[in-house]
Image (cartoon, helix red, strand yellow):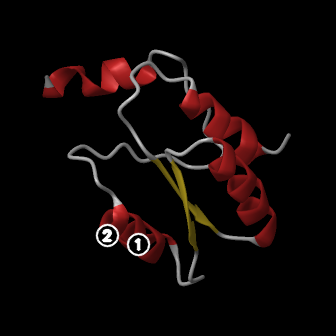
Amino acid sequence: MTNIDEAVTARLKLEGQNFEILVVAPDEKTEQVVNALSRKYKQIKLYKDSGTGKPAALNLLFKHAKGEILVLSDGDVFVGKSALKFILAPFS
């Protein structure tokens, strides 16, 4: 299992079902892993990184995000099962 595989899998286990996971793939290995996951989980969407830096990658995600609240993270960050509940609490 790779870091991105573990990180995305951890996000799939977050409490609450109404969310999407958008991934900008910076390399071919990440693209392969996320492609495989996106075939299995419909809430995962993959976008190809243009290679022009993190701001460009974030702008790409902002353009495609459908939600009202965006929670940003990186592929090497692992989250606990209740993390989203605590992040979103001030918005309810």
Q: Are marks 1 and 2 in contact (CB under 8 Å)?
A: yes
Q: Circle 1 — which element?
A: helix
**Could you tell me which residue is drawn at 86 percent across and 40 percent down?**
1
Q: Position of residue 31 (x, y in %)?
A: 72, 64
Which disc number belongs to residue 17?
A: none
Which residue matches tag 2?
Answer: 63
Q: 30 or 79: nearer the eye?
A: 30
Q: Is residue 73 above or below residue 92?
A: below
Q: Residue at x 67, y 51 (%)?
A: 39
* Camera-nearest residue between 17 and 9: 17
Q: Position of residue 54 (x, y in %)?
A: 49, 70
Q: For this view, does 77 lie left or right of residue 37? A: left
- Kindly identify the residue that appears in the image at 22 percent across and 20 percent down: 89
CA gap, disc 1 and disc 2: 5 Å
Q: Amino acid at mark 1?
A: Leu
Residue ranking furthest to the right:
1
At which x and y percent is residue 85? 34, 19
Q: Which residue is mark 1?
A: 60
How crowded is the residue under tag 1: few (<14 C-alpha within 10 Å), some, or many (20+)? some
The local crowd at label 2, few if under 14, some if 14 to 19, many if 20 or more residues have their Cα within 10 Å, is: few
Q: Height in image: 90 above or below 33? A: above
The C terminus, quarter of image: top left
